[in-house]
C-alpha cells in the first residue's frame, strides 16, 4: 500500500476517514493540526517474515551474521 502522492490525496483520505467536507478541511482546520494528526492515523505496515530458529547452529549463524 502506498501513501498519497499529492495534497489532494491527503485531503481525500481525511474526508474518507472523518466525513468532513473539503471546504471544512481547507478553511476550518489548520494545516499544522492536520499534520500532527496524520502520523497517528491507522495504516498498513510491511509484512515482515519471521524466521524460526530450530537448532543451536542456526542460532549461532543468526547471531554472528
Image (cartoon, grey):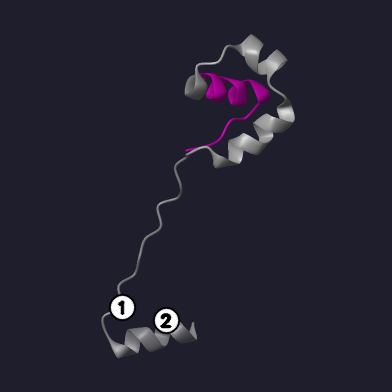
- 26 and 3: which one is in front? 26
Start-end of magenta stretch: 1-15
Disc on res. 62: 2
13 within the magenta span: yes
Disc on res. 41: none
SS at badge 1:
loop
31 within the magenta span: no
- 13 and 20: which one is in front? 20
Q: Is residue 13 above or below residue 35?
A: above
Please name the residue shown 49% across and 82% down the image.
Answer: 65
Please name the residue shown 52% across and 37% down the image.
Answer: 41
Q: Position of residue 37 (x, y in %)?
A: 61, 35
What residue sits right under mark 1 in the picture? Answer: 53
Please name the residue shown 46% across and 47% down the image.
Answer: 45
Q: Is residue 18 above or below residue 40?
A: above
Q: Is residue 43 left or right of residue 54?
A: right
Q: Position of residue 42 (x, y in %)?
A: 47, 39
Which residue sits furthest left? 54
Which of the marked residues, 1 or 2, is nearer the chain's N terminus? 1
Asked if labels 2 and 1 touch by Cβ distance under 8 angstroms, the answer is: yes
Q: Position of residue 6 (x, y in %)?
A: 65, 26
Q: Position of residue 33 (x, y in %)?
A: 69, 31
Please name the residue shown 48% across and 86% down the image.
Answer: 64
Amino acid at each position: 500500500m502506498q501513501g498519497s502522492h499529492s495534497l489532494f490525496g491527503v485531503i481525500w483520505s481525511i474526508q474518507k476517514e472523518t466525513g468532513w467536507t473539503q471546504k471544512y478541511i481547507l478553511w476550518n482546520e489548520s494545516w499544522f493540526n492536520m499534520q500532527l494528526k496524520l502520523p497517528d492515523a491507522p495504516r498498513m505496515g510491511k509484512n515482515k517474515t519471521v524466521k524460526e530458529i530450530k537448532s543451536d547452529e542456526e542460532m549461532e549463524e543468526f547471531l554472528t551474521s
